[in-house]
Image (tube, grey):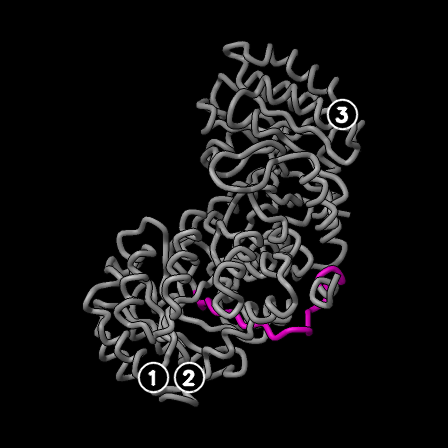
Amino acid sequence: MNALTSALWERRPQTSVRIVDAHAHVGPYSLFFIPDAGSDGMVRVMDRCGVSHAVISSHLAIQLDAAAGNAATAEVVGRAPDRFTGYLTVNPWQDPAGELETWGSDHRFGGIKLHPDLHDYPLTGGRYAPVWEFAQRTGCPVLTHTYDGSPYNDLPMVDEVAVRYPDVVILAGHAGATPNGFDAAIEVARRRSGVMLEVCGSFNSGADIARMVREVGADRVVYGSDFPFIDLRMSLGRVIFSGLTEEDRAAVLGGTMTRLLQWRSGRE
Amino acid sequence: MLIDADAMLGRYPRRDVGTGSITEAMDRMDRFGIAEAMVSHTLSWLHDPVTGNRELLDLVADEPRLHPCWVMLPDTCGETGTAAEFVAAALDGGVRAVRAYPADHGYDLAGPDAAAMLGAIAEAGLPLLVDAPQLGWPALESVAAAHPGLPVVVGGLGYRLLRQAAGVLARTDNVYIGLANLSSHCGLEWLVERYGAGRVVFGTGAPLRDPAEAVTRLMWAELDDDAVATIGSGTLLGLLPLAAR
């Protein structure tokens, strides 16, 4: 039992570690019903558990309309900048350069979000070039959806981009998403120092997360939940009970992501 | 107190989840503060229900914290005997619940082939456990309507099924939701507010799922302690045969 699990068993919010959710969204989503998908409900859940901060891209941005969705993300962050940072969603079919121009210097955004599967466009495609060039120039981290076997964002494609842009921090969202994907994501992260593993999804486990940390280091693995797409507590519980040392767990839960969000004060 | 209604023993062929041994199951329960568990055997699911059900009884015979959950088949081919024989053997063996895999075992749970078995299970007072991917919601509702005395606990909802589940929960009073991989954002609280904590059953899905999910979801739920206690063990205990409560 430690301070974090003590808080859980006593059913009170944890306060022993700064938790930053590196993979979150906001708002409704057409494929299924999400109760309380707005930012108020998200903050309430964060407070219930003791999660300090979440990095979000609106569902509107990833699903339908990057421009309107990025504005929605900015609005949510603007209302609660201590709780949220935005991912600027770039849809390769919806003016990538224009979105970067509009929002690239806006401090409400701390990262870029790509979802090749939703946009039917490969991570390696040329329409994403402005993203990689922006990230290379500024140090802005890029979170991309990954899924083992996908024609658009399989792990070899992350590897290919990481070779082309070795200085860019690429967060491999879901770390491949399946057991086979976890193996592939670990292999890519071991080869490419810019690739970080983000651990949310439906098939991950504490044992998988512990293996990722053993293989690539706690400074290369970050906690994300995908909430409100998926409940925040699913992924959080896996990390809490993963058996990591307190130091490694603190890095995964928030230390590493906090560091990655500091880029505007450095290279910009 | 936590009682896990959704756990399994035995090997698993599609990812590394350990050996499926009793020792691992007990260690896991101790680690997550789970007092007791209803367990099925992967042999019953992924090889042969007859063999798996039999071996399960031997495995848990000396483990008072583990309670057997058998896997049913329709009695059309006589594999598990007649419905009456299956249920009598289950009760004789201390079986607490019955699990169905209609998709994986190739039958229609809502059709005439399974009706006799479901009727016998209901008459014996045993709850039926089935994971959401194993059948559609209209079929599930048909089963619940045809056997109003049969508690049906649906597990493995994931995060995409509240629209389907909500209608069935509203139109029935013998359908329950399992907590294993109930992963809709705020879905647990939403279900409890609408249908009551007495419609939700704690389960982990272990070892295929990490028990950390269900435990963390429940402990940090936006629910009062009474609701958590109901979900943690109360709902399930109310569904079990009287002798097992």
Residue topped by disc 1: A138
- Side of B101 where A123 appears, left or right: left
The verdict on a common chain for dots 1 and 2 is yes
Q: Which kind of residue does numbered mark 2 sit on?
A: Trp
The residue positioned 42% from the left and 77% from the top of the image is A86
Residue topped by disc 3: B61
The residue stretch that appears in magenta: A8-27
Q: Residue B54 in the image: state x and y as whole percent.
A: 65, 19
Residue topped by disc 2: A263
- Side of B178 where A96 appears, left or right: left
Query: Which quadrant holds the C terminus of chain A?
Result: bottom left
Secondary-structure class at tag 1 = helix
Q: Residue A84 in the image: state x and y as whole percent.
A: 49, 77
Q: Chain of mark 1?
A: A
Q: Which kind of residue does numbered mark 1 sit on?
A: Thr
Q: Which kind of residue does numbered mark 3 sit on?
A: Ala
